[in-house]
Amino acid sequence: MPELAINGGPPVRTDPYPPWPEVDDDGYVAAVERVVRSGRWGGYPEPGPNAAAFEEAFARYQGARYGVLMANGTVTMEVALKALGIGWGDEVIIPALTFQATAYAPIAAGALPVIVDVEPTTWCIDPEQIEAAIGPRTRAIIPVHLGHQMADMDRIMAIAQRHGLAVIEDCAHAHGQRWRDRGAGCFGAFGSFSHQSSKILTAGEGGSLLTDDEGLAATAHSIIDCGRAKDPEGTGFTFGANYRLGELHAALLTVAIERFPEQQEARARNGRRFQELVAQVPGVRVMPPDERITRWSFYNYIVAIDPDAFAGRTNHVVARALAAEGIPAAVQYPPMNRYELFDPKRSRLPVAVEYADRLDPSRMSFPVAEEAGLRASVYFMENVFRDGDRGVEQAVEAVAKVQAHADELPLP
Ligand SMILES: Cc1ncc(COP(=O)(O)O)c(C=O)c1O
């Protein structure tokens, strides 16, 4: 009789983890119904009433002065770069372990993404590598707060100030996080957030920029609204396109932000318990949240496995075995030089052709991101942490079971 569910044995968990998003008729359905009945469905004139209400509420929660809601958390970064005047001929430093959107955004703005390795203790961008990559064309840094961590904002802001660089934080995983009591997305010129289906503040689609700068907020509003002027005089036209979010989605977000604090607390509480328990499984290394994180609010919790302790099996095999045990676990990102989605020669963008040699994956080496993406990282999805003690205990039981029987897993 096989032990592991992936080989036909009984899974650790047979009932599903709580669905995401948590739907309730009084909140989401009622909010959407109000929009439907109002007849004002679209995002024009920009911002619509629900968009404006969410922008204000989310900016306040996170600790910024202005929010700008738009279509998704990819164009947010493109718009941020354009609002800062960053484009042709400029370089933007990004980490080697992230979703491809972080690299797409500079290319879409016409700039070259300069990809650097991540730190072994957080898997977020390595400040030493940022310093080493700065050149005469560098204009901005996009740190990504990956999984349950935050990038080292103390060092990144110091480097940015020393070199006169803009910082745009990619906070797609970090709604609610705080670093030394300051909200993620409130450090640099802009913070960028995704509200895509899996994200912890979601409307299915959507993205937000946060900023403290009134002028930058007005420029971002203009860029997402076909370049229309947004300044009080009505003269500040920009070059833009339609990246507006419709009011149906915005209405969902006005409800989601009300539910958010309670969900964040539950995830943080269960995350701490998970971390304590999973650290005891042989071959599992936890990377506790940086001590400077003063409110812990995460999207995925990421552990590092040592393939030697898993009979030579690597993260992809282990994650598949965990999924078969009924645990929402996966490997989210390969290192940037192995990204199939992100192949600049295939994108056929002029900038990619011009910079093809500098973006040639075969010329890149990111030892830390490669170890993480190809061998070690296993991401546990947010709903593992919304199911009380049972949810995290079963996830840990599954990790221990897979480790104990790793020699029965298929070789990669
Ligand atoms: C790190 C990171 N950046 C950016 C994005 C892009 O967000 P969106 O899917 O809303 O475009 C995502 C998620 O999908 C992400 O995980």
Image (cartoon, grey):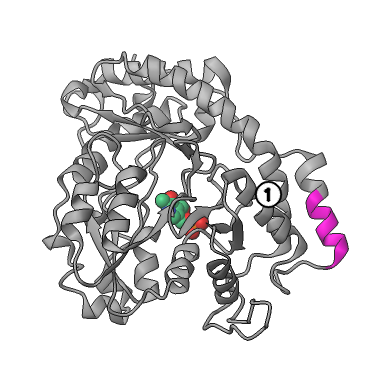
Which residue matches tag 1?
57
Total tally of numbered discs in the picture? 1
134 horizontally vs 61: left or right: left
The crowd level at tag 1 (other Cα within 10 Å; few <14, some 14-19, many 20+) is some
Q: Residue at x 64, y 47 (%)?
A: 60
Q: Quadrant of the C terminus?
A: top left
The quadrant holding residue 353 is bottom left
> x%, y% of residue 315?
27, 34
Q: Residue at x 44, y 73 (%)?
A: 82
Q: Quadrant of the N terminus?
A: top left
Q: Residue at x 21, y 75 (%)?
A: 355
253 horizontally vs 302: left or right: right
> x%, y% of residue 16?
56, 28
Give the extent of the magenta segment: 31-39
17, above or below 152, in the image: above
SS under mark 1: helix
49 horizontally vs 356: left or right: right
Kindly identify the amino acid type of the residue bearing the numbered disc 1: Ala
Q: Is residue 376 visible?
A: yes
326 horizontally vs 63: left or right: left
Q: Residue at x 46, y 62 (%)?
A: 74
For ligand 1, tell me if the residue under mark 1 lies within 8 Å: no
Q: Is residue 9 visible?
A: no
162, above or below 19, in the image: below
> x%, y% of residue 104?
37, 65
> x%, y% of residue 324?
41, 29
Q: As rendered, which of 294 and 314 lies closer to the eye?
A: 294
Secondary structure mostly taken by the magenta-highlighted segment of the chain? helix
140, above or below 8, in the image: below
